[in-house]
Each structure stands twice: as structure tokens, then as C-alpha cells.
Image (tube, grey):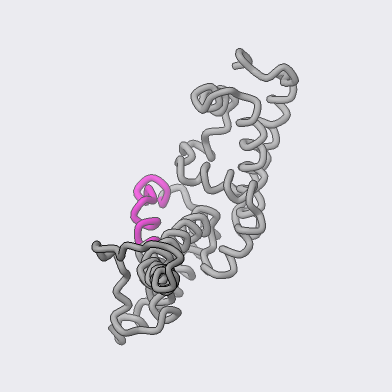
Amino acid sequence: MTANLGHNTSPHALDLLANDAKHGLEMVSKGEGQTIEGWIIYGAALNEGRSMFPSDEQFGQWVISSGVYQLGTDEIRREDRAAAMWAAANQTEFEDAKKLSGARTVRGIHAKHLEHQRFQDEIKRSLEPAARYGRNKNEQNNRDEGVIPFEWPTKKRENIIDLEGRDPQEFNRALHYVADFEEAAKELERQRHDQILPTLNDKERQRMRAAINRIDAVTDKIATRI
């Protein structure tokens, strides 16, 4: 897939990028401490590859034809690909979101980043009436002095977040806490358990049992307090 490329682009350059992307995916497949770094390498290669195509459609065709759309035998989800590309292009924001969210996957960190952005946008929108009141009050004072004619707004904005009497930080913390569990539940539900479990070796089954014990300990603690 080399048609309609930029004038400085060569098939060789695309091959090198595909190799970089595959190397990143190999690191992801090894798991443990290499997963996040692998996704970032993968995302960086895709970002550079995207810059060489005039359209998303042609870029998508290259992703498929170069074989960088699969992790093992499973197709990489669009959310994972988008998260990897975002993390590679915005490493400062990625590190900040990683620290704030506590998420352990690139997709989870990206999801928390987007959620935090939406929350901040809602906070800004909720504060707009007060800010507008302050501006209007200043304009009213100027009008009293014969400076600027002013007309008071008649429509009140309704989309204000109900903090339910809680401190904003407490509200934000609770929001992320619940969302983390919902995301974890969704992630577990997405897995192809019936296909994957029979393929695990002894070491992997041991790791799974240990992880399940940790999950049980956490959920038991929570279940007694809600």
C-alpha cells in the first residue's frame, strides 16, 4: 500500500515503521514490566505512519496490509490503538494521567484522561453562570456610571453538577473510584475466557490463581462496607 504517499515517503520507511510497531507488540505480549513501553513504541510507529498518508482510510489499509493490526491471533481493539497513539504523542499528559488515575494499562490511563477532561469541562460549565454574573455585575456598574449599556440575561443555565453536598475533591475521588471498578468489570467481561483458559501453562495458571485471590480479598473488603 504505497499509493498517494507523501513525496518523501518510501516503502522502505513504511517497512521500518511496521517493524517498530511489531517490536512494540512483541513487548506487549511478554507482559509484566514491558507492556506499557511496548504500547508506546507501537503508538509512536503508528503516529509516524499516519503522517505519511493523506487519509485515515489509506492509513488503515496500511495497518492491515503490514500486519500491525493483531496482537497474537486477536485483532487489536480500536480503543487500544487510539490509546497507544495518544500516549506516544502526549507523554507528559500520559505520565500525569498515569499518576492521577492509578490505572495500569495504556487504554485505562487514556480512558481516565478522557474522563477527567469531561469532568473538568463539566466543572467549567457549572461555574459559567457565576463567572457570567460577575461580568454582568461589572457591566451593570459601568452602566450606572453611563459607560456601557447592559441587558441582564434572562435564561439560567441548567447543566450544573450536583455535588450532593460533598467537597469537589471528594466527589471527584468517588467518581473515579466507581469508574475504576466499572472499567475493571468491563475488561474482565471482554476477555475470551473459554478460548484462553485451556491454553494456559502451569506458571500462568498459578499467576491467575494468585491474582484471583487478590481480587477476592479486595472485593470482600468492599462488599462488607457498601
Q: Position of residue 126 (x, y in %)?
A: 36, 68
Question: Where is the C terminus found, in terms of image quarters?
Answer: bottom left
Verify whether residue 196 appears in magenta: yes
- Magenta: main secondary structure: helix
On screen, 6 above or below 116?
above
Q: Nearer the viewer, residue 147 or 194?
A: 147
Q: Position of residue 130 (x, y in %)?
A: 38, 72
On screen, 172 above or below 69?
below
Q: Is residue 173 left or right of residue 2?
A: left
Question: Where is the N terminus found, in terms of image quarters?
Answer: top right
Q: Residue at x 58, y 44 (%)?
A: 85
The residue stretch that appears in magenta: 183-197
Occupied quadrant, residue 14:
top right
Q: Position of residue 113 (x, y in %)?
A: 50, 59
Q: Nearer the viewer, residue 28 or 97?
A: 97
Q: Residue at x 67, y 34 (%)?
A: 48
Q: Nearer the viewer, residue 163 or 97?
A: 163
Verify whether residue 98 appears in magenta: no
Q: Is residue 141 left or right of residue 46?
A: left
Occupied quadrant, residue 15:
top right
Q: Residue furthest front?
A: 146
Q: Position of residue 81 (x, y in %)?
A: 52, 42
Q: Nearer the viewer, residue 161 or 217?
A: 161
Would residue 153 be visible to someone looking at this image? yes
Q: Is residue 214 left or right of residue 163?
A: right
Q: Residue at x 36, y 76 (%)?
A: 219
Q: Residue at x 32, y 77 (%)?
A: 163
Occupied quadrant, residue 106:
bottom right
